[in-house]
Each structure stands twice: as C-alpha cells, then as structure tokens.
Image (cartoon, helix red, strand yellow):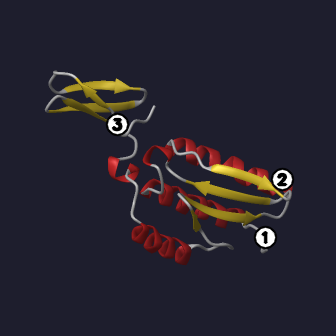
Amino acid sequence: MTLSAFWLNIETGRRKVNVGNDDAIFAKSAKNLVLFGGGQSMAKLAKISDQQIRQRLAKLNASSQNEGRWRREGDALTKEFVLDSFTGATRFISRIAPIANAMDHHPDLKLYKYKRVKISLTTHSAGGVTLNDFTLAAKIDKLASKTQPAKK
C-alpha cells in the first residue's frame, strides 16, 4: 500500500508504523497527525497552475522521441499512440500497467481503431493535473520509444 498523506485528529505523539511494505512515520502537528509513506509526496499531489502545465508540456514534448504530442484536455493530459497492430497496442497497454501500479497512479486507456491507444492522465484526488501526471507521462513516453509505435 502506498500512502502520500493521511490526516487523523488524535492526540498522540510521534510513532512508527508499518503500512503494507512501507515504513511510515507519524508526525504530530497540533491535533492533526500526518502519515508519510513510501508513496508520492504531497507536492506531487497538488494541482499545478495553468502556466506550470504549459511549461511542463513544452518540456515533455521536446524530450519525447516518439510520434504525437501530449496535450491538455480540460483537467487531463492526453496523448494518442499508434502502434503497428492490435497485438502491439495491447502489449503496450500491458506494459503501462506495472508502471502505473508501482506509482499507484492509473491512467484512462482507450484502445480504438484496432491499433490506436489514447492515454488520459489526471489526478482525481487533486481535481486536475499534478506533477504525478507528468512523471507518468514521461515514463509512458520512454516505454513507447522502446516499443516503436508506427507513424501515423
């Protein structure tokens, strides 16, 4: 289990607990207790500004070595990948799954026209795009460059 921050209203001091495979530290702040786990930091879960999104999209797209561009669509980042076949598209999706699971951040995936995969990234708990979405987008781009999607 991966937790980023969990608030409790209790009156205890500092404790160490084991949550899943992660050691977590409880740190008391007034009456609020914060659980920091091995997952993403609170900064990664905070919604980022429109300007930050534009800047990060430009950087992400400049570093991409595959076809297509990440775009902002509402409160999400999206990109379409065109693979060489239906099997290639399903393999690409299956390679995304362990990365998303390790990050505890799961994209919306759409397989259509037999070899096209559209990915949508958003952080629902933050109500929009966070640094976590950009981290996963970069990992997906790196994965896609290894699977060599076909040109559109």
What mark, if any, has residue 37 been given in the picture? 3
Q: Quadrant of the C terminus?
A: bottom right
Q: Quadrant of residue 98?
A: top right
Q: Which comes before the other along the chain, label 3 or label 1? A: 3
Which residue bears the numbered disc 2? 87
Cα gap from disc 3 to disc 2, whole angstroms = 37 Å
Give the percent coordinates (x, y) of residue 78: 62, 62
Left or right of 57: which side holds 35? left
Dot 2: few (<14), some (14–19), or many (≥20) neighbours within 10 Å? few
Residue kind at label 1, given as amino acid type: Ala
Cα gap from disc 3 to disc 1, whole angstroms = 40 Å
Cα gap from disc 1 to disc 2, whole angstroms = 13 Å
What mark, if any, has residue 150 been given in the picture? 1
What is the total number of numbered labels drawn onto the structure image?
3
What mark, if any, has residue 40 been given in the picture? none
Give the percent coordinates (x, y) of residue 102: 52, 43
Residue depicted at x 75% and y 51% = 91
